[in-house]
Amino acid sequence: MMSESVDKFELEAHYLYENTPSKNRKLRALLYPTEVYDAFNNLIEKGAKRPATVCASMLRYIEKIETNGFREPAGDVELKPYILHNKNKNKKRVSVCIPVELLERFEGLDVPTNNTLTYTLAMYDYLLSKGEM
C-alpha cells in the first residue's frame, strides 16, 4: 500500500482481493479515457496495487450509489468523466482480476450507464478523492 493514509475502501479492497481464491476472480479488461488511465498509472507508480485500486474504486462507487442513489451529473467536476469518456475514442486498457462477488455487486447497480462508463465514473471519483484528478 501507499505511505499516505489508507481509507476504508482501500482496506476492504485489499482484504477482499487477498482473501478471494483465484478461482473466484474474473479477469476484466477495463477501458479508461487517457486522462483517467494516466492518473491511475501515477497512483500505481506511487506504490498502489493495481487490483486493490480498481476494487477500492468499485467499493467507493457502490457505497455512493447505495447511499445516495444515482443522480444526473451537475457542474463541471461531475460532468468531466462523462466528457472524457465520450470524447476519447481511443481508450487505454487495464487488465485486472476482480473478485466475482464484487463484480456482481458492481454490475448489478441500478445506474443508467453502460459498464465501460460506470467503471470510468468509479475510477474517476476514486482518483479525485486521492487528489490525482
Image (tube, rainbow, N blue to C red):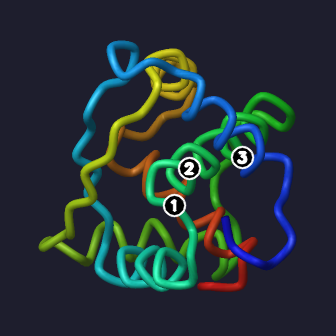
Could you tell me if the residues under marks 2 and 1 are in contact, i.e. CB atoms within 8 Å?
A: yes
Quarter of the image for residue 84 reads bottom left
**18 sits left or right of 41 in the view:** right
In the image, what residue occupies the spot 65% across and 43% down? 14
**2 sits left or right of 52 in the view:** right
Ranked by sequence position, the earlier of labels 3 and 2 is 2
Q: Is residue 50 above or below residue 86?
A: above
Q: Label 3 vs label 1: CA separation?
A: 16 Å
**92 sits left or right of 96 in the view:** left
Quarter of the image for residue 110 reads top right
Residue 125 on image: x %, y %: 64, 63
Q: Label 2 vs label 1: CA separation?
A: 5 Å
Ranked by sequence position, the earlier of labels 3 and 1 is 1
Amino acid type, mark 1: Lys
- Within 10 Å of disc 2 (Cα), the crowding (few <14, some 14-19, many 20+) is many
Given the current orientation, which residue lies at the most extreme left position? 90
Q: Label 3 vs label 2: CA separation?
A: 12 Å
In the image, what residue occupies the spot 69% across and 67% down? 74
Amino acid type, mark 3: Arg
Q: Which residue is mark 2?
A: 52
In front of the other: label 3 or label 1?
Answer: 1
Could you tell me if the residues under marks 3 and 1 are in contact, i.e. CB atoms within 8 Å?
A: no
**59 sits left or right of 34 in the view:** right
Residue 132 on image: x %, y %: 61, 85
Mark drawn on residue 60: 3
Which of 54/2 is in front? 2
In the image, what residue occupies the spot 53% across and 28% down? 106
In front of the other: label 3 or label 2?
Answer: 2
Q: Which residue is mark 1?
A: 49
Residue 114 on image: x %, y %: 35, 38
Amino acid type, mark 2: Ala
Q: Secondary structure at mark 1?
A: loop
